[in-house]
Image (spheres, rainbow, N blue to C red):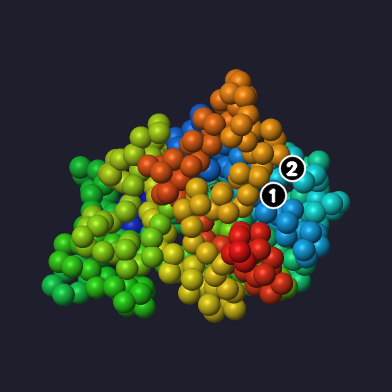
Amino acid sequence: MREIRERGGAVPCDAFMELALYHPQHGYYASGRPRYGREGDYLTAPTASEWYPRLVVRLLRHLAEHGGPLRLVEVAAGDGSLLAGVLDGLGPAGAGPLREVVAVERSRAMRVRLEALLAAASGRVVADPSSVPSSAAPTVIHASELYDALPVARAVGRGGGLAELWVAAGEGGLAWVERPAREEVAAYFGRHGVALEEGQIGEASLGAEGLHRRLLQGAAGAGLCLVLDYGYEARRLYDPRGRRGGSLTTYAGHRFGRDPLAAPGEADLTAHVNWDDLRRAAATAGWTEIGLWPLAEFLLRAGLAAELEERGLGPDAELDAAAFSTRQELKRLLDPDGMGSDLKMLVQARGGMVDAARSALRLDL
Ligand SMILES: C[S@@+](CC[C@H](N)C(=O)[O-])C[C@H]1O[C@@H](n2cnc3c(N)ncnc32)[C@H](O)[C@@H]1O
């Protein structure tokens, strides 16, 4: 409230989200409390089950066999669940399939945890994607729920054009107010060919395309990028028959809510990714799209059935306690009414990784 008053009493939605999520003292992600995972407010694929990192390991092993040791850049590394699984499966960096590991994480509290995790594994931790040096080494970039955690602007269709929704701090607390749309917001909808209907709300992730382009440009040689997130292509994301009220949602205590102003700093705020932002970035950086699949299909393509078989957990395995618990965990990742279909994996590649990724993900059959 105080910061908004100091900035003239009202700020655009993206500035409000920046404060609510990333303010160094009061932001949701600034706290050392677990925000995601079983003790947190919501589950992500890496925190839901060790089978997600296991399948990433399988893919990395295949790529390293084809192109040599890899540099892994784990962006929005969070509590390190993905990295812990990868290091467990492949061993520390500098030997074997991993040449180097870089964890990128904006939250200071999470960086402390990541430094402890990577201290014995020859990895390093940085705060900002622009601190990842460009490298010609074969590079894999992985980001789970990074882009849906970026601040977004909010626009509403008005009189055949656009207005913007700002957050005002008044006597009665926080409230939405309408302002003329900023040029960059109008340009965002313009370049995606989107016209919002009267009263329809849509979010614009103003930083997503530039951030993704910077990440991709960090791989100067062969590269593979895995982005796991909730989202749609622009034509579906802004279809007025679907999300007329936009996709901005709150999460607290494993429950979702629709009032982003109710408890700033206490609840997660998230908006769906517009996959076309990441596609535009890839096109400019000279990367090729390998596929965009629901999480369940990605896991199957990455070799889930073979992985289960190799661990003695195939369809004929005896249903003992271990096999039962594996099935329960996998159900969470594969759930057609949850993560299995709502989370999508975008796979993009460059240079020698294009063919390696196609064969690893069964596109050459
Ligand atoms: C929803 S959590 C996902 C964490 C982890 N990837 C997972 O799937 O469990 C989002 C994370 O992204 C981090 N984050 C947001 N913007 C970032 C940025 N520009 N660079 C690095 N990390 C960022 C946040 O601090 C937070 O830890």
Binning the other alpha carbons within 10 Å of mark 2 as few (below 14), some (14 to 19) or many (20 upward) gives some
Q: Who is closer to the viewer here, 223 or 77? A: 223
Residue holding disc 2:
89
Residue furthest top as drawn: 321
Residue 144 locus on image (x, y percent): 54, 51
Quick check: 202 left or right of 324? left
Q: Secondary structure at mark 2?
A: helix
Which quarter of the rendering shows the C terminus? bottom right
Q: Residue 31 location, x and y as percent?
A: 52, 38
Which residue is at a point 22% across and 62% down the rendered structure image? 240
Residue furthest out toward the right: 95
Mark 1 or 2, nearer chain start:
1
Does any portion of residue 266 appear in the rendered image?
yes
Most foreground residue, 274 or 267? 274
- Neighbour class for label 1 at 10 Å: few (<14), some, many (≥20)? some
Task: Decide if ligand 1 comes within 8 Å of the CB at mark 2.
Answer: no
Disc number for residue 58: 1
Amino acid type of the residue tagged 2 in the rendering: Gly
Horizontal placement of 244 versus 288: left or right? left
